[in-house]
């Protein structure tokens, strides 16, 4: 038993409590899930990096790290892989992992792996849909029902962590900067935008508090999909399932991106894979005649029908500005 | 780079335009654009000195401009069909332009003589035309809504070959020795063109919605065609290799969708054009935007501001310096939103920098 206790703890993501086999994969995960700019999909290296990027490049204020669980949305905490995790959270996590009995632990992990890997895979910036033969339907909505119950469980262990999360970081926000910052940004520059961040963050804090105390279940109406649900996820992948259990920080809903994702996650997953049910969340800008192309629809118009009249002169009426020959 | 890349000249040219919001990217405006929507754009091949641009329109005409290096556009000539023009194609030597029309004919336009003669006939509007130049034969490939693809030697009134398909042809592309034809039933046919056009492979679509545009791309050395990009009406493009080294080489990506509003608007992908040297691609959509992508790095290189009208067509010059795009209504919102008074524009922009793949970090 004692030997087992010494087993090093697996890398885990502070933002969503997911456990990984390898820190490299964790870093990939963080870049793809938590540090990706919702506007240009650039993958940044840290939460503050993302905030600075959004502020400087897109003039947008990010109020929370995307896809993070309640209490872990702080954009000012610099976390890169396992570096920079507040000591208290690290201890809590280790304790929790040890408390969980072996098989249980394994089970939970498997669930996470099975649901999440698929959308972690593409090492790219925009939505890659690996279609192998079957096309994007591969893992259609069918996966959903089966996944859901497990997902619910997944969310559970996060609950107790929720309210604790913010305490550490909020106390010493600046103090939390890890000494060896991997984010290659000079400090002065960093401070600038952070100062600006202070503005929006301030008032938001209290707003969050009630939710954190009442916490646990997702606030109604916040499906908590990842911002990438709509733009990033390949159809048919059970992305919705991975997102359902992760409660979104209410404040994050102030980001337009997350608004959209609420909409999406409130729709059924079928709306993303299905042919027609784009309506609730998105609108296909097409006349809706699935059996005809735009040209066919347009060609039916009287105006273009008439022009086919056989009596029209073949000779080209020269346009005023045109010369006779090309060369 | 020097071609058209002179910022000072293009700037002064841009300044001569009244800067209204029809040109949010402040690109060069082609003079005397067609009076109705522009359905297709094609640049002249490398065999011609300089650059010529051909546009076909719903006003039944095909127009030709000379694009000078300083960005000036000179209207050269035009020809008419008896119905809307749906596609154009240059001959390999640049002396002729082939035009496909809803009047069920395709014509060959001899530019030097400014004479157009009919070279193809279908039972329904011709949606696509492509010139095929093989060492031992040359012909015009036409794809029609009569569910056939036909090959014409331009001298005979009957085709040298015809392939019957299950559905109407919606889009096609040819990069010798490969041709791709995509149909209304979302089936794709790959043709091999050596010795004669032959069906090589049939695919089911990687996309779930109606196909709209297809463009063949070459391998990294730009020596031979290896795959295609297929655009659908549901703001999505599939990158598909004919013989992928791994199934993961094939993927789709979303594009031409509005930023989160309620509801999100998903637009039609109207055209795809590959850069001749970089292998990057441009897409244009009914959202009135164009985007440049790097399919190998799987990144978006650049997006445009939104134009007030759809972008209905695009093309890239043979030297890869000029990106042309047409701002005109593409019928994506139906006839109710058609305004014949709305002016149509063709814009030119230097894309040599914007389409360059980013250096790896």
Image: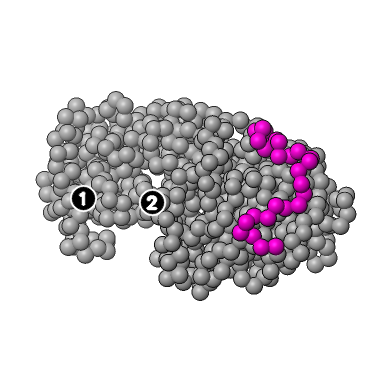
Camera-nearest residue between A56 and A125: A56
- Percent across and percent down for residue B179 are 72, 54
Q: Residues within 10 Å of mark 1 (few under 14, many from 20)?
A: many
In this image, B304 relative to B296: left or right? left
Residue at x 22%, y 33% (from the top left corner): A160
Q: Chain of mark 1?
A: A
- Percent across and percent down for residue A291 are 65, 32
Question: Is residue A72 among the parts visible in the rendering?
Answer: yes
Q: Chain of mark 2?
A: A
Residue at x 65%, y 35% (from the top left corner): A303
Residue at x 40%, y 65% (from the top left corner): B361
Q: Which residue is mark 1?
A: A77
The dominant secondary structure in magenta is loop
Q: Earlier in the sequence, mark 2 or mark 1?
A: 2
In this image, B19 relative to A273: left or right? left
> Is residue B17 depicted above or below A149 in this figure?
below
Residue at disc 1, secondary structure? loop
Question: Is residue B241 among the parts visible in the rendering?
Answer: no
Residue at x 56%, y 69% (from the top left corner): B68
Magenta segment: A299-324
Camera-nearest residue between B202 and B265: B265
**Does B169 lie within the magenta span?**
no
Q: Which residue is mark 2?
A: A40
Camera-nearest residue between B49 and A110: B49
Residue at disc 2, secondary structure? loop
Camera-nearest residue between B91 and A278: B91
User: How is the model colour-coded?
Assistant: one colour
**Does A316 lie within the magenta span?**
yes
Determine the image quadrant of residue B7: bottom left
Extreme-bottom residue of the structure: B2
Q: Residues within 10 Å of mark 2 (few under 14, many from 20)?
A: some
- Percent across and percent down for residue B55 are 63, 54
């Amino acid at each position: 038993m004692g030997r087992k206790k010494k087993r090093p703890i697996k890398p885990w993501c502070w933002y969503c409590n997911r456990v990984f086999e390898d820190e490299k994969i964790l870093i990939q995960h963080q870049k793809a899930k938590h540090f990706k700019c919702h506007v240009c999909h650039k993958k940044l290296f840290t939460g503050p990096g993302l905030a600075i990027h959004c502020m400087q490049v897109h003039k947008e204020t990010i109020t929370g790290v995307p896809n993070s669980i309640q209490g872990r949305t702080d954009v000012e905490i610099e976390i890169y892989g396992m570096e920079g995790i507040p000591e208290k959270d690290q201890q809590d996590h280790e304790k929790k992992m040890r408390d969980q009995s072996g098989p249980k632990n394994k089970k939970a992990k498997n669930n996470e792996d099975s649901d999440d890997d698929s959308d972690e895979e593409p090492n790219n910036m925009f939505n890659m849909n690996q279609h192998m033969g079957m096309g994007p339907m591969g893992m259609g909505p069918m996966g959903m029902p089966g996944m859901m119950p497990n997902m619910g469980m997944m969310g559970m262990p996060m609950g107790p962590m929720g309210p604790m999360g913010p305490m550490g970081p909020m106390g010493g926000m600046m103090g939390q900067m890890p000494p060896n910052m991997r984010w290659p940004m000079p400090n002065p520059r960093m401070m600038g935008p952070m100062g600006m961040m202070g503005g929006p963050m301030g008032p938001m804090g209290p707003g969050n508090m009630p939710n954190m105390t009442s916490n646990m279940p997702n606030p109604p109406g916040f499906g908590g999909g990842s911002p990438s649900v709509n733009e990033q996820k390949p159809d048919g992948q059970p992305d919705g399932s991975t997102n359902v259990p992760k409660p979104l920080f209410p404040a994050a809903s102030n980001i337009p991106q997350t608004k959209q994702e609420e909409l999406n996650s409130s729709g059924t997953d079928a709306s993303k894979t299905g042919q027609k049910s784009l309506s609730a969340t998105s609108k296909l800008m097409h006349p809706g005649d699935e059996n005809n192309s735009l040209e066919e629809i347009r060609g039916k118009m009287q105006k273009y029908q008439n022009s086919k009249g056989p009596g029209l002169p073949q000779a080209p009426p020269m346009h005023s500005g045109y010369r006779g020959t090309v060369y | 780079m020097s071609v058209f890349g002179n910022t000072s000249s293009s700037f002064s040219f841009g300044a001569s335009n009244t800067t209204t919001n029809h040109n949010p990217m402040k690109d060069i405006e082609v003079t005397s654009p067609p009076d109705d929507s522009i359905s297709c754009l094609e640049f002249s091949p490398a065999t011609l000195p300089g650059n010529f641009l051909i546009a076909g329109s719903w006003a039944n005409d095909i127009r030709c401009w000379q694009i000078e290096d300083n960005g000036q556009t000179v209207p050269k000539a035009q020809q008419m069909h008896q119905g809307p023009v749906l596609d154009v194609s240059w001959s390999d030597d640049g002396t002729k332009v082939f035009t496909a029309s809803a009047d069920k004919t395709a014509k060959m336009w001899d530019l030097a003589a400014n004479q157009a003669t009919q070279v193809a006939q279908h039972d329904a509007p011709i949606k696509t035309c492509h010139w095929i130049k093989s060492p031992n034969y040359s012909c015009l490939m036409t794809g029609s809504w009569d569910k056939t693809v036909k090959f014409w030697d331009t001298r005979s009134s009957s085709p040298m070959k015809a392939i019957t398909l299950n559905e109407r042809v919606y889009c096609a592309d040819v990069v010798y020795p490969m041709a791709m034809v995509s149909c209304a039933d979302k089936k794709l046919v790959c043709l091999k063109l050596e010795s004669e056009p032959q069906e090589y492979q049939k695919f089911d679509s990687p996309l779930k919605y109606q196909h709209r545009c297809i463009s063949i791309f070459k391998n990294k050395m730009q020596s031979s065609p290896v795959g295609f990009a297929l655009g659908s009406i549901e703001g999505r493009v599939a990158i598909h290799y004919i013989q992928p080294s791994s199934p993961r080489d094939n993927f789709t990506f979303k594009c031409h969708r509005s930023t989160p509003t309620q509801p999100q608007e998903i637009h039609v992908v109207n055209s795809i054009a590959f850069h001749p040297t970089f292998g990057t691609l441009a897409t244009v959509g009914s959202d009135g935007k164009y985007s440049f992508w790097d399919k190998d790095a799987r990144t978006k290189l650049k997006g445009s501001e939104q134009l007030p009208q759809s972008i209905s067509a695009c093309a890239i010059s043979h030297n890869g310096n000029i990106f042309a795009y047409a701002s005109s209504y593409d019928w994506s919102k139906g006839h109710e939103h058609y305004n014949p008074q709305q002016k149509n524009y063709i814009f030119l922009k230097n894309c040599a920098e914007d389409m360059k793949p980013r250096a790896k970090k």
